[in-house]
Structures are given as structure tokens and as C-alpha cells.
């Protein structure tokens, strides 16, 4: 057991080193980098599609997609004329920093104003793997239930931004929004929370303005 | 890298050994054991609640709940007067067979007709960890989108039963049910598929009858 813990610690240390290299590269390129983390089906790709459709040239974007299998998500982004690269992890339940380095070597995603990294659909594994991002964004869809922040506390404590998605479905669901906001405040008092619907467009402009403000702060 | 693969292989071999012990124990006890696997928020606990409410003494049930944090799910089952034990995994993204052995040593969950093991909310990690169960059940909620079986093929290929949950929300969602059924058939042609709504009760009797038939086949 101690052996396994040491192996895991070494893997994380190697990842942190690669992430530091990435962070410097992103800083030089002037790119804001966002690591999107959620359960499968919370609407990460759909949020990116809604964001791109509403961008109106406010920033340039590129996307790295992480999935166990299929190129579907990268195809969806490319269909909107935004450069996207698909990383297939095989069995692995998270992206790691070396995969991002390889992705940058084999593509022309940089320079860009904002690089979105959509992690593998998983609320647990991606939490501890730094990808050199400026901040993590946790997504929680209203359909997943209002107990999730306390059930998966690590990611909601680390994410500087939480996006509550599928807010248009609230009338059809037993979802206590106030309870979720309370849990998020307990886990991370300084986190920003945005409520969105990629279907109706609610909250998408607020999300874009949040990204713009953070990019301005980074490149100022 | 090879070192990590070897460590993982040894961990899985140790787990398989513990699972074989469990399988013999469950056989002796005459208990059908079901390993429920899905994304967070697909409705595993809610399906168990709906099942218990509709059981009408057709079988006795007990539940082992796996979560990263909180006793919420076990509390929900106990509130229905069904014995439940909560396993907290800390950071781990799946249950393992030793945790089930420990749970059985410290509780009186056996004898029971059906033991439900609700795994940690995760479509990836629980796939390769045998818990001595008779079969795995994958849950997929209509709100997660119709591309999920091909995006997480390992679990849908291994699960003998897939339950499509939240079927009552179909009118509000862009979800191509036929596409999902086609993907499931490709990944596992012999799998049984049940469509349920824990809200309206649709499909719950069919699910209970499936469990009864499998228990009869096991104890015959």
C-alpha cells in the first residue's frame, strides 16, 4: 500500500513538473487556459459550442478534448471553425500534463486568446492533475441532483469557477439551487458561480465576460 | 511506466482474489449481488429507493453504498427500513473487493435475497474491479446525452444490464433513444436494457422482475 502511495506521489510530482513547463509556455503565448471538469454529460462540450456561437470575436479560442474513446467532441468543435485536438486516454480517467505538451507539439492551437481543455468526464480523477491551467472550472448540471458538491468535495473546493448548467430544466426537476449554492460557499467561499443554459443562452454572456476579465487580468 | 502498469496489475490480481472469496460467500448465502455503476447523478440511489418502495415483499434487500464523501446515500436507504452500509473511499474513484469484505464483517447485511452494491459515481474506474457480484448494471440517464455508450465503451460492454433512467424527461431533451440502443447492441449484443423513471414508476416492475428471474436462476 505504501509502495502504491509512493508511486502515485512520484507520478504527481512528474506531472507537476510538466505542468510548470506548460504554465510558462501559456504565459509567454498570452493565452488564458481553462481546465473544464465535470461528470459525463454535464454539458462541457455543449457549453463550449454555446460559447463559440455567442463569441462575436470577443476572443479567439482553441480546444483540447480529453476522452476515453471517440473523436466526437473535437469534431463538434471543429464544425464551428475553431481548432480542436482530441486526446484519447484509452482507459485513463483524466488528462495529464504530458498529454497536453504532446498535443501542443503536434498541432497549431497556439497562439490563441483562450485555450479550453475539456477533461475526461469524471468528478474525481482530474482533480489532482495540474495541466498548467490558470484555473479549473467545475460544471454541475441541474439534472445531477443537489447533493453533488458535498459528495465530490475536492473538485468543488479547488475550482475557482463553478458553472451550473441546464438551468432551463429546473422546472422539471427536484433541484434545490439554494442548497447547492450553500455547499459551494462552504467548500470554496471565494469561488465564482455562473448559472447557464446552453439551450436558451441564459448566462452565456456572463460566462464570456468572466473569461474576458480573467484574460485581461492575466495579460495586463 | 512499465513499473506503474505492473503495480496496477498486482493490485487487480489481489482484488480478483478477494472477489473470488466474496463470490463463494454470496453463493453460500443465496444472495444475488448487483454492482451498480454510473456517472454521478444518473439516479442510482433514486432507482434503489423506487425499487424498495415497489418491492411488496417480492425479495429482501440490503445495500452497500460507495462514495468519496458523506453518509447521505446510506441514510436515504435506511429511511426506507432497508439495511445499508456506507463505505467512504476518501479520494478513490471506485470500490474494491476488500472494502466489501470489511463491510460484511462489520455489519449484518447477509442473509438477504438481493444485495445491491452502489459503486462510486464514475463511468471509468469501477469497470475493472470485480466485487464478487453476479453482474454489473450500468445506468445511463437521458440527461447525460445519447453519445455516452461509445464514449465510455468499457462499462457498457461489460454490464449485463443497462438501465436507462429519467425516461420521463425525454420530452424536454435532445436524446436519441434509438441511437443509444444501437450503441448498446454494438458493445454488448446480449445485454438486457430496461427503461425506467423513478419519478413516474415506469419500468420499475420490469427491473424487479429481472432481478427475481436472475435470483431464481442463481439459486435453482
Image (cartoon, coloured by chain):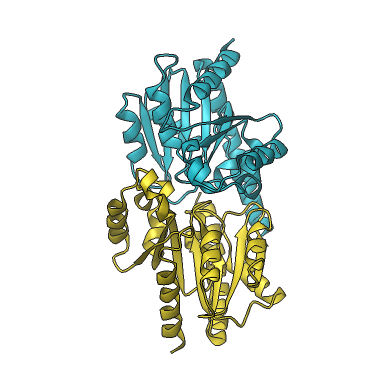
Chain colours: A cyan, B yellow
Which residue is more in the foreground, A24 or A204? A204
Residue at (44% x, 54% y) in the render = B166
Which residue is more in the foreground, B67 or B73? B73
Residue A202 higher or lower than B121, as above or below? above
Residue A93 place in picture, x, y as percent: 49, 48
Give the quarter of the figure containing the C terminus of chain A.
top right
Q: Is residue B130 visible?
A: no
Residue B183 place in picture, x, y as percent: 30, 55
Q: Is residue B31 visible?
A: yes
Using residue A220 as the reference point, say whether residue B39 is left or right of it: left
Give the quarter of the figure containing the N terminus of chain A.
bottom right
Residue at (61% x, 44% y) in the render = A176
Furthest-top residue in view? A220
Residue B139 place in picture, x, y as percent: 45, 59
Residue A11 higher or lower than A100, as above or below? below
Residue A49 higher or lower than A14, as above or below? above
Which residue is more in the foreground, B75 or A13? B75
Residue B118 higher or lower than A196, as above or below? below
Report which quarter residue B26 is drawn in: bottom right
Residue B146 place in picture, x, y as percent: 35, 48
Q: How many marks?
A: 0
Amino acid at each position: 500500500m505504501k509502495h502504491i502511495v509512493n508511486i502515485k506521489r512520484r507520478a504527481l510530482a512528474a506531472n507537476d513538473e510538466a505542468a510548470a513547463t506548460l504554465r510558462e509556455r501559456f504565459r509567454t503565448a498570452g493565452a488564458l487556459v481553462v481546465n473544464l471538469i465535470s461528470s459525463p454529460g454535464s454539458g462541457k462540450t455543449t457549453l463550449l459550442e454555446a460559447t463559440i456561437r455567442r463569441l462575436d470575436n470577443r476572443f479567439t479560442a482553441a480546444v483540447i478534448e480529453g476522452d476515453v474513446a471517440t473523436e466526437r467532441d473535437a469534431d463538434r468543435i471543429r464544425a464551428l471553425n475553431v481548432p480542436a485536438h482530441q486526446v484519447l486516454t484509452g482507459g485513463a480517467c483524466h488528462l495529464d500534463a504530458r498529454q497536453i505538451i504532446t498535443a501542443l507539439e503536434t498541432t497549431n492551437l497556439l497562439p490563441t486568446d483562450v485555450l479550453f481543455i475539456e477533461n475526461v468526464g469524471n468528478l474525481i480523477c482530474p482533480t489532482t492533475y495540474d495541466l498548467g491551467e490558470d484555473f479549473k472550472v467545475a460544471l454541475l448540471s441541474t439534472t445531477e441532483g443537489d447533493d453533488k458538491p458535498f459528495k465530490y468535495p475536492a473538485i468543488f473546493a479547488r475550482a475557482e469557477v463553478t458553472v451550473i448548467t441546464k438551468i432551463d430544466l429546473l422546472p422539471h426537476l427536484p433541484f434545490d439551487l439554494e442548497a447547492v449554492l450553500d455547499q459551494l460557499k462552504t467548500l470554496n467561499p471565494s469561488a465564482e458561480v455562473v448559472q447557464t443554459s446552453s439551450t436558451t443562452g441564459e448566462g452565456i454572456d456572463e460566462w464570456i465576460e468572466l473569461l474576458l476579465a480573467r484574460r485581461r487580468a492575466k495579460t495586463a
